[in-house]
Image: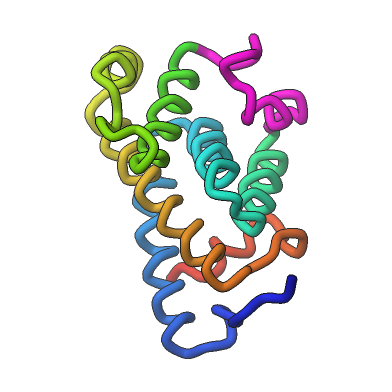
Amino acid sequence: MDARFNLFDNEIAVKFAKRFANASLVIHQSPLPKSTQELVSLRASQINGCGWCIDMHTKEAAAAGETSVRLNLVAAWRESTVFTEAERAALALAEEGTRLADAHHGVSDETWAQVRKHYDDDQIAALVSLVALINAANRLAVIVHQQGGSYEPGMFASMSS
């Protein structure tokens, strides 16, 4: 499968990508733990089948010191012992926030209660924004068949200004 359109070779798409990267800086600079940010982004990307974003967030997490065991178990986080209760709450929110069409009630009260238990208001704002942002990124990349494999850590961050 070849990419349908090069988002990095079009003036409008590049302008949008720079603004998108700048919006992501708000989340990256938030008090939400960086490891949680990458795990949430990776899980939503797995659900959405976004090879580009899976590649990006796996490599960014590994570059930041995340273990291969944890990265390999993100897709089966409920069936593993390597995630904290706070990370489990964030991963549940990511799944329920990503699968809105599958879960007609959206994020459950139980999941929300777990998120409230483990994160403060600033972290929750960042977490909710992150779920929205990664889902938007997944849709951009999946629509144009942006393929994974060529991402280098730090590549997207260099777009922000």
Write the residue at 26% across / 38% down.
125
Asked whether residue 6 is in view, the answer is yes
Q: Position of residue 18 (x, y in %)?
A: 44, 73
Tell me which corner region of the image, top left, top right, bottom left or bottom right, holds residue 118. top left
Give the magenta-colored segment's residue range: 66-84
Residue 70 to residue 28: above or below: above
Q: Position of residue 1 (x, y in %)?
A: 74, 70
Left or right position of 46 against 95: right
Quarter of the image with the C terminus in it: bottom left
Residue 117 to residue 160: above or below: above
Q: Position of residue 91 (x, y in %)?
A: 47, 27
Q: Is residue 69 magenta?
A: yes
Left or right position of 1 against 34: right
Colour convention:
rainbow
Q: Position of residue 26 (x, y in %)?
A: 34, 51
Left or right position of 20 against 155: left
* Count of numbered tags: 0
Asked whether residue 31 is in view, the answer is no
Nearest the viewer among 51 and 9 is: 51
Left or right position of 147 against 78: right
Write the residue at 69% across / 25% down.
73
Task: Identify the main secondary structure in magenta.
Answer: helix
Nearest the viewer among 147 and 115 is: 147
Write the residue at 75% across / 24% down.
69
Q: Residue furthest bottom?
A: 11
Nearest the viewer among 89 and 110 is: 110
Q: Is residue 79 magenta?
A: yes
